[in-house]
Image (cartoon, grey):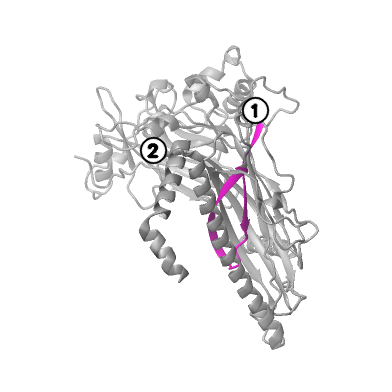
Amino acid sequence: MADPSWNTDTGEAVYRSRDPVRNLRLRVHLQRITSSTFLYQSATQLGDDLINLATFNPHTSASGHRRDEEEEEEVVIGWQEKLFSQFEVDLYQNESACQTPLDHQYHQEILELEASGGRKNRRIFTYTDSDRYTNLEEHFQKMTTSENEVPSFLVERMANVRRRRQDRTSREGSLLKSRIITWRPTEEFIRNNHVINTPLQTMYIMADLGPYGKLGQKNYEQVLCTLKVDSNGVITVKPDFTDNKGPYRIEMEGEKQEVWKYTIDNVSSPAQREEEEREQRVFKDLYDRHKEYLSSLVGSDFEMTIPGSLRFFVNGEVVSAQGYEYDSLYVHFQLELPDNWLSPPHQQLSGITQTCVTKSLGMDNVAYFSYPFTFEMSFFHEDASPDSLPQWPVLYFEVISLDFWQRYRIEGYGSIVLPSTPGTHTLTISTWRPVELGTVSELRRFFIGGSLELEDLSYVRIPGTFQGRRLSRFGFRTKTTGSVTFRFHCLLQSRAFLDSSLPWRKRQSVMDLMGRFSQQSSIINVMEAFQRARRRMQEARESLPQDLVSAASTTNLLASSSPRHRASQGQGSL
């Protein structure tokens, strides 16, 4: 049964620090737990009349080190500080075993250590970020302590993730790869290229827990602590610092089953008061400079509109298109500003989305664009007569398909009056396209592309060049196609909403103007709904066979010649 004083929480802890990581200092204390250790600890607490075991001289190993030095050790380690193990000392002493520049550097450092009296550490050593060491326990795919746990798909994938080294630099002038996109990647390709771009440095604090006098065997190496630091100042420690908790415990396998305990403490020297104040001043100066930079971008004064005018902001989005015949769709749209409306010189009043492939959603094929656009415009009310009806901006658009052979086809035309009320509006607009009689145009559309097009998009509603009283579209045949969904975020700005110093007539004119806009928008919506219903009835009538149409007309004639109908006509004439 485990001693309750042991620290069994070996999970990792995450810290964040703005100080340089080179100031990190850790104190690691390692001690072997044996029966003689408990006897020694209890004997030192006895009186002077009993035998004091501390007076016994400890044994000396064959390497010249005392036994108590190998059973208990305490070392203070800095970040990326290299402490050699007995195995590395034996390996790098032989220059013929050195292959890389790092190996030769370690060879020189070990020779200098031997010349200065040998290394100070015995069992505790480190592996830095430059060493070729991999902790196999980090690739262990279990996330809990349950023996029946089955690793999930995410755990299996993340087990093969590698991170880029922090000291890795990009090679300038590198040749471009022949294949930028790999359409069918293999498992090995995915494993080799699945790299997280966050730079990361790793350091391992190790312990050689081999038998007394036989240090330097790789199978007795144990990981005491793993430190990871990324470029954002996030420090990951596994296991966490001991602090006031109990020590960690390591049980060795074998005949003796030795038990070791160790503690990890953060002994980094605290910053002086002057340094903290200087650091706070530096950060305050940095934040003030950043605040001034943002203020220079936004401006200190709130920009107001001209008295009697109305500013209109629209942050829109072409959300999706659905119900069209062909695939690979894109939308071309443009905004028409009526009289008395102006836009800034830099404002673009047209746009075109990316080409999007459709996906099946129920019975329709939907293309999701999520294409954003922004409009800014201002209205100057010059004609204050009550009979004048101002116009609201209209957004015209056309849906076009483009196939593999670069054949494009007009899929539909549509228009929408921008919302006249502030807030968020999601609108779905039905579209239509012009058609010709016969099958030749449809065959041309299918095989070589192209179709009837409108020279002016404003012909979807009322052309801007039209000056008459009535617009006749007799003989113009159309076909209902799919629909396009738009999302608008509207904002209205005017002094009439806030400034009470303006004349009452000025404020009232702007308020009446918005009311007229809303009324006009409602009338236009009703008229467009009637036009769509009439167009659908006409298409349904054209799709009926001729014998049914003739039978329906005959029925109407018979009904009109019935006595009751004639009587009703007679009563009506009277």
Who comes first in sequence, dot 1 or dot 2?
Answer: 2
Q: Specify the farthest residue to the right.
A: 345
What residue is shown at x 66% (from left), y 55% (from top)?
461
Q: Is residue 461 in view?
A: yes
Residue situated in front as seen by the camera: 178 or 61? 178
Q: Is residue 560 magenta?
A: no
Q: Find residue 313 and report its horizontal and vertical position in percent.
A: 66, 63
In the displayed structure, 377 sits above or below 440; it is below
Residue situated in front as seen by the camera: 476 or 426? 476
Residue situated in front as seen by the camera: 77 or 315? 315
What residue is shown at x 46% (from left), y 39% (from top)?
544
Q: Which residue is mark 2?
A: 30
- Magenta-highlighted stretch: main secondary structure? strand
Q: Find residue 439 and report its horizontal and vertical position in percent.
A: 60, 30
Q: Is residue 28 in view?
A: no
Q: Quadrant of the C terminus?
A: bottom left
- Helix, strand or loop at label 2? It is strand
Q: Quadrant of the N terminus?
A: top left
What residue is shown at x 24% (from left), y 40% (from top)?
39
Residue situated in front as seen by the camera: 239 or 176? 176
* Left or right of residue 241, residue 261 in this image: left
Q: Which residue type carries mark 1?
A: Arg
Q: Which residue is mark 1?
A: 444
Q: Specify the farthest residue to the left.
A: 1
Q: Which residue type carries mark 2?
A: Leu
Q: Find residue 36 and report its horizontal and vertical position in percent.
A: 26, 35
| Magenta-drawn segment | 406-433
